[in-house]
Amino acid sequence: AGMAAVLKSIFPNISTGEIKARILGSAIQPPAQGAALYGLPNLNRAINMPAQTVYLPNFKAMDDAVIDEARLTTQGTVTVENLWKAASNVKAQVLIGGKNAGVVQINSLASNGKFNLPWSYKFKSLDDSAILNLQVVISDSSGVSKNFFFHLTAARSMENMKKSSSLSLADVKSDDWFGNNNGHAYAKISAVD
């Protein structure tokens, strides 16, 4: 908030998008991949920064992805905003595990323009890790290439899990179970020497 106030006092007609762009674009690279979206902002760089494209993917809008168990796939969309200078020949892609999961090419993207980047991923089996490491790579004709990283959890549908683990109480024999109460069957406890 302090940097935004300083920028607004120096540039009274500055837009909200340009404030965000200057703060994010001034950032020094974070020490580790995924540590921060852009890094540590630098006020002097933000004040003296020439107009440039600054891309901001909206990962906050992405909910957990649900796995389509019949197809072993999950999918989603990342919305990306260009906060400042217009861009041309924009290419954006999502990589998951180093493999292409989605790509979009845009001829022209205005300042404050947005686009959607749909992606889809196929699991080898339901035993695969449910944590997807998304890498979003955005480049344009200016030579800018920016990488963003996000960890997303893909979840199995609880309805399918419930159906696959349900047991008809008609199939339960009295000597197989401790009891049943309100539709729940309780298993015997046994010890092995």
Image (spheres, rainbow, N blue to C red):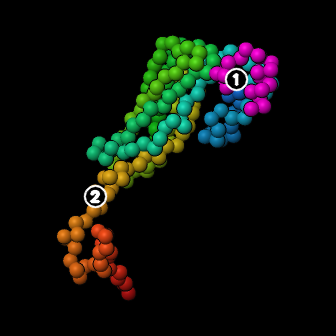
Q: Nearer the viewer, residue 62 or 142?
A: 62
Along the horizontal axis of the image, is 82 left or right of 65?
Answer: right
| Residue of label 1 | 19
Residue, x 51% and y 18% (percent of image)?
90
Q: Position of residue 29 (x, y in %)?
A: 69, 33
| Residue of label 2 | 164
Along the horizontal axis of the image, is 8 left or right of 51?
Answer: right
Q: Which residue type does callout 1 highlight?
A: Ile
Is 13 contained in the magenta span? yes
Looking at the rendering, which quadrant does residue 184 occupy? bottom left
Q: CA distance from mark 1 to mark 2?
A: 52 Å
**Range covered by the magenta-colored residues:** 1-22
Residue, x 22% and y 80% (percent of image)?
174
**Label 1 residue SS:** helix
Q: Nearer the viewer, residue 158 or 71?
A: 158
Residue, x 36% and y 53% (percent of image)?
158
Q: Residues within 10 Å of mark 2 (few under 14, many from 20)?
A: few
Q: Nearer the viewer, residue 173 or 22?
A: 173
